[in-house]
Amino acid sequence: QVQLVESGGGLVQAGGSLRLSCAASGRTFSSYVMGWFRQAPGKEREFVAGISSSGGNTYYKDSVKGRFTISRDNAKDTVYLQMNSLKPEDTAVYYCAADYHPRGYIGTMWYEYDYWGQGTQVTVSS
């Protein structure tokens, strides 16, 4: 079993920044691909960013490229999402997720991930 706990969400004005953290426990963190997803009210959960188990590869949703950065610290069992130049359309509950199955790529679909955190709210005001 893997437990994931997100933190760092909040209310920020457009153009501002937030840094989300996701602390993992339970199994070997460095074995997982990690992803960040988000879900806005009335919308489906969508992929935001992912990072390989070593941290050497990352992948982003087009609309966040250049604004968001995913990173991980395997010594601290933590993955981060630095969000800059935030826009009102970034408002959502953000979830971190762990993919324990070695696929050879970073999954972008929710069903490719095995474990989920409880989510943290990000609200961007205009």
Image (cartoon, rainbow, N blue to C red):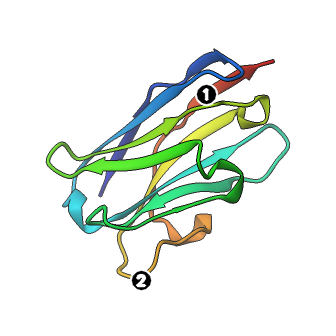
Q: Using the image, determine if residue 125 lies above or below residue 83.
A: above
Residue at figure coordinates x 76%, y 39% from the top left: 40
Task: Locate residue 47: give its quadrant.
Answer: bottom right
Specify the label residue 103 is tagged with: 2
Residue at figure coordinates x 52%, y 26% from the top left: 18
With 84 as the anchor, is 126 left or right in this view?
Answer: right
With 46 as the anchor, is 78 left or right in this view?
Answer: left
The residue under label 1 is 121
- Badge 1: how crowded within 10 Å, few (<14), some, or many (20+)? some
Task: Say which amino acid is labelled 1.
Answer: Gln
Task: Locate residue 115: give its quadrant.
Answer: bottom left
Residue at figure coordinates x 80%, y 37% from the top left: 41
Of residues 12 and 116, the one nearer the viewer is 12
Q: Quadrant of the C terminus?
A: top right
Element class at badge 1: strand
Task: Say which amino acid is labelled 2.
Answer: Arg
Q: Earlier in the sequence, mark 1 or mark 2?
A: 2
Farthest residue toward the front? 66
